Amino acid sequence: MFTTAISKQEGIIPEKFNLHQNYPNPFNPATNIKFDIPKASYVKLTIYNILGKEITTLVNEKLNIGSYEVNWNGMDYPSGVYFYKMVADDYVNVKKMVLLK
């Protein structure tokens, strides 16, 4: 299992919550996921497989205002379609990504 590091992009103050499309996509074996937080909020970012089963949680903590990026390494998972979901305050968004090995 790999440790997930959250990096904050300095000097950026977002105006709204936003979950960006991961890049690269498709990916092998790692991808980056960016998201924006316009106010201090409890943030949960979770990865699901195609069947909707939660496979890992990348972020599960209170974060300050800013733009953040996390890296997910799918080396231990099979090729296929995955979903990532961000929940922060009243904001919920889900995006699709593809792991190709």
Image (cartoon, helix red, strand yellow):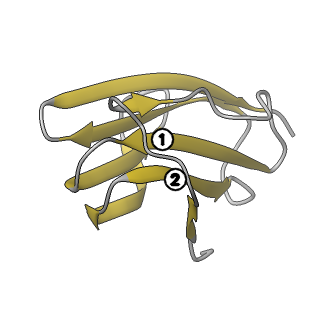
Q: Nearer the viewer, residue 37 or 34?
A: 37
Q: Secondary structure at mark 1?
A: strand
Check if mark 2's residue and mark 1's residue have beta carbons within 8 Å. Answer: yes
Judging depth in this view, the residue of 51 and 73 nearest the camera is 73
Instruction: Residue 63: name its quadrant.
Output: bottom left
What is the crowding at mark 1: few (fewer than 14 residues within 10 Å), some, or many (at least 20)? some
Decide if residue 57 is on the left or right side of residue 68: left
- Disc number placed over residue 1 in the picture, else none: none
Q: Sequence-wise, which precedes: disc 2 or disc 1?
A: 1
Residue type at mark 2 is: Tyr
The residue singled out by tag 2 in the image is: 68
Residue at image mark 1: 35
Left or right of residue 76, residue 8 in this image: left
Q: Position of residue 70 (x, y in %)?
A: 58, 56
Q: Tell me residue 5's x, y (percent).
A: 57, 71
The residue depicted at 44 percent of the width and 45 percent of the height is 13
For this view, does 88 lie left or right of residue 95? left
Nearer-the-camera pick, 23 or 28: 23
Q: Is residue 100 above or below residue 75?
A: above
Image check: 44 left or right of 51? left
